[in-house]
Image (cartoon, helix red, strand yellow):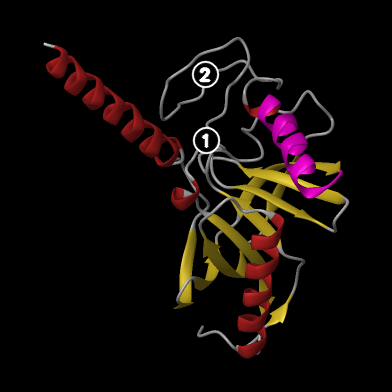
Amino acid sequence: MRKKLMWWLIAALGVVLLGAVLWGPIVSNVEQPKYKVVESAGNIEIRDYAPMIVAEAEVSGDRREAIGKGFRIIADYIFGNNTASQKVPMTAPVTQQGSEKIAMTAPVVQQGDGSNWTVHFVMPSSYTMETLPRPNNPAVKLKEIEGKRFAVIRFAGMGGQDSLKRHTAELDEFVSAKNLTPQSAPTYAFYNPPWTLPFLRRNEVMVEVSGEGARQ
């Protein structure tokens, strides 16, 4: 009896651990910005992104502190602190509140100069500037972004400062070797919630580029 109970406990623990492993990727399976891969080389891609609308906030502080601060400001907007009151179709779950709740997308994007940062969420493609609810918080700005070309390097792990620096340097070497011209400072993109196991995480460094080095 005791042996049978032990096997039941082991099986239950296995289910819990499997759930913990899969939960991050599952909840990260949300709408993402649309793009076309123009060229790829290992973990680096040149992508043409479609136009998009973002909600963004400008914050200050070190990188880790700033992204948390920016995330909370914009999450407050998409989870209901806005001027609309109509129901918006959701993927899962379907929820209705007195004010509008907007579907989450990925990634959370961060761009800055070391002390001042812009953090933004891409809005679901079903919205336009006319149909998006207005933020109640003036710190949240809605902005249309035209289609652009980016060189992007993808990697797993925690996305700490050393990893970001190393992968940015690798991306810079690729951009230079392809005779591309950087048009922006590096942008950091994080696709997963914080409890996702490191080897299942998707992180990216993105740099807007121009030039004839990529196949058209």
Q: How far apart are marks 2 and 1 (CA)?
A: 30 Å
Query: Left or right: where does residue 163 sit relative to residue 214?
Result: right
Residue at horizontal 12%, vertical 17%? Answer: 4
Residue placed under numbered mark 1 in the picture: 195
Viewer-side label of 2, 1: 1
Instruction: Say above or below: 89 vs 188.
Output: above
Secondary element under disc 2, as helix, strand or loop, is loop
Instruction: Say above or below: 108 vs 154.
Output: above
Q: Does the magenta stretch include residue 20?
A: no
Relative depth, front residue between 212 and 199: 199
Residue placed under numbered mark 2 in the picture: 87
Secondary element under disc 1, as helix, strand or loop, is loop
Which stretch appears magenta?
61-76
In which quadrant of the rendered image does the N terminus lie? Answer: top left
Relative depth, front residue between 209 and 28: 28
Residue at horizontal 73%, vertical 28%? Answer: 134
Residue at horizontal 66%, vertical 69%? Answer: 166
